[in-house]
Image (cartoon, rainbow, N blue to C red):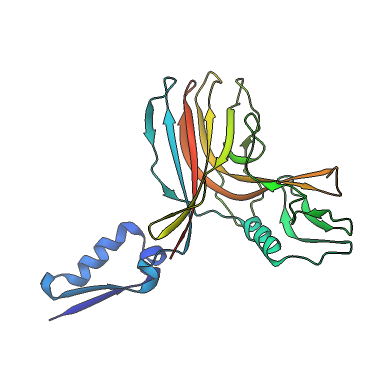
């Protein structure tokens, strides 16, 4: 007797709780010789995603010695704002006359971002004349890689971290924020990787346990040259559980990856 078992994404990812999968398979193959069992997976199960986001957190003591690392884990938590931003940035607009519009992208104050262009050339945020980035300065916790204490599950409509730690300092629930830096985009075997990272230090006098983290993008809006409106836009959020004792520092790394 020969038995062929075919597993699809529903079996692997959702339909069967992980704790019962082994018992389910044991029941199917009971009494059958292993040489007569064929296992197969559909293409969806074993094919890598063509676009991935991975994260890693390294922890260091006050002397700079690495204490532990999460290892790279898959981030599952791009939120709606990410594709709202990408859609407007890639579709382009018509220059030469004034126009403004909204597309359902909300900043961290839950204000819908207004996209603007004028016949004077100011454009928000679809032009090099306006700001739109994540390369935050040292001491600036309001954008770039951000962290927080919130434990709510991530949803597609999240527009901010639940309980972000934004204040740079050494008192209370404060952290010392280094720069958010990016590396050159490089081909690594079958992958193309772009890496951003940030050093965050805890000098608060007590342990701070990170429960969430993500990326806020900065956008300056309005007419040149003043750009009077500033938006901070959350494009992703992850639930984590990572304790940093006072005197310790962590390096948070996000790796953006495309795969052929």
Q: Where is residue 167 shown, x and y percent of the image?
A: 66, 29
Quadrant for the N terminus in the image: bottom left
Visible residue check, residue 31? no
Task: Examine the rendered structure and indicate whether residue 151 appears above or below residue 3.
Answer: above
The picture places residue 50, in percent across and down from the top left corner, at 46, 64
Any part of residue 90 in sight: yes
Residue 114: x percent and y percent?
A: 80, 55
Q: Is residue 148 above or below residue 85?
A: above
Q: Residue furthest top?
A: 205
Residue that appears at 89% across and 64% down:
97
Dividing the image into 4 quarters, which one contains the C terminus? bottom left
In the rendered structure, the answer to whether residue 199 lies left or right of residue 117 reads left
Left or right, 211 with respect to 222, comes to left
Relative to 35, residue 230 above or below = above
**Left or right placement of residue 93 versus residue 209 in this view:** right
Residue 138 lies left or right of residue 184; in this view the side is right
The residue at the point 84 percent across, 56 percent down is 121
Which residue is depicted at the point 49% across and 21% down?
A: 246
Q: Residue at x 22, y 72 (%)?
A: 28
On the image, the x and y values in percent for residue 107 come to 72, 49
**For residue 68, what is the image quadrant?**
top left
Front residue (pair 117, 46)? 117
Count of marks placed on residues: 0
Instruction: Residue lying at the far bottom in this picture: please name it.
Output: 1
């Amino acid at each position: 007797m020969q038995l062929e078992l075919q597993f699809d994404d529903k079996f692997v990812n959702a339909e069967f709780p992980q704790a019962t999968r082994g018992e389910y398979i044991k029941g199917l193959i009971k009494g059958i010789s292993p040489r007569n069992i064929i296992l197969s997976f559909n293409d969806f199960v074993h094919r890598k995603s063509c676009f991935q986001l991975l994260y890693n957190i390294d922890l260091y003591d006050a002397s700079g010695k690495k204490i532990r690392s999460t290892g790279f884990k898959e981030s599952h938590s791009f939120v709606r704002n990410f594709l709202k931003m990408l859609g407007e940035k890639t579709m382009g607009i018509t220059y030469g006359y004034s126009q403004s519009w909204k597309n359902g992208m909300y900043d961290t104050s839950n204000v819908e971002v207004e996209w603007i262009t004028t016949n004077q050339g100011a454009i928000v945020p679809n032009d090099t004349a306006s700001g739109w980035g994540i390369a935050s300065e040292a001491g600036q916790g309001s954008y770039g890689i951000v962290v927080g204490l919130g434990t709510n599950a991530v949803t597609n409509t999240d527009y901010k971290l639940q309980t972000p730690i934004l204040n740079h300092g050494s008192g209370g629930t404060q952290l010392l924020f280094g720069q958010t830096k990016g590396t050159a985009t490089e081909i690594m075997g079958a992958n193309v990787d772009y890496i951003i990272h940030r050093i965050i230090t805890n000098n608060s006098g007590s342990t701070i346990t990170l429960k969430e983290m993500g990326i806020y993008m900065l956008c300056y809006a309005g007419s040149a040259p003043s750009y009077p409106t500033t938006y901070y836009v959350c494009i992703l959020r992850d639930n984590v559980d990572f304790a940093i004792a006072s005197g310790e520092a962590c390096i948070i790394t996000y790796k953006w990856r495309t795969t052929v």
